[in-house]
Image (cartoon, helix red, strand yellow):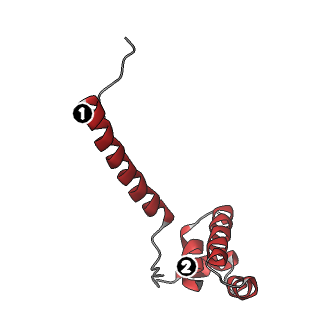
Amino acid sequence: MLNELKRYIKYNSEKLNFLKLRNKFFDRLRNRGFRRYTLSKLFSAVNYSSRNKLLATNDTIYSTVVQETKADMALIEMVEEIFNHHLGKHTGGFRENDHFTNR
């Protein structure tokens, strides 16, 4: 958890973006059953004010969590593939550059 928070700090140049991610992360962990008290203690150990120090180190912060943006993109690609597959069955094959016209 601490490494994930450090990674959020390191890769977010704006404090507001870090805080949003941190809060989402906290909520996800609460939804998985982690106690609020335990999470609060852990989360308080990592502060955005340490960003310059984290940036100055060459330590790579590893995370076993798939970034949300990558997961979102994978999901979008999968849904588009399914959509195009089903649309192709019903329209005789629709391609991305095809255009619909009202006739």
On the rendered structure, is 1 left or right of 58?
Answer: right
Q: Amino acid at mark 1?
A: Gly
**Do tag 2 and tag 1 residues touch (Cβ < 8 Å)?**
no
Task: Tell me the number on the disc at residue 5.
Answer: none
- Frontmost residue, 83 versus 17: 83
At 24% from the left and 33% from the top, the residue drawn is: 93
- Frontmost residue, 41 versus 92: 92
Q: Residue 70: percent from the left, percent from the top?
A: 43, 62
- Callout 1: 10 Å neighbours few (<14), some, many (20+)? few
Cα–Cα gap, marks 2 and 1: 44 Å
At 29% from the left and 43% from the top, the residue drawn is: 85
Quadrant where the C terminus sits is: top left
Which residue in the rendered view is the most extreme toward the top? Answer: 103
Q: Residue 75: percent from the left, percent from the top?
A: 42, 56
Quadrant where the N terminus sits is: bottom right
- Frontmost residue, 89 versus 35: 89
**Element under label 2?**
helix
Q: Residue 101: percent from the left, percent from the top?
A: 36, 17
On the rendered structure, is 3 left or right of 89?
Answer: right
Task: Tell me the number on the disc at residue 93.
Answer: 1
Which residue in the rendered view is the most extreme toward the right? Answer: 37
Q: Amino acid at mark 2?
A: Glu
* Mark nearer the N terminus (2 vs 1): 2
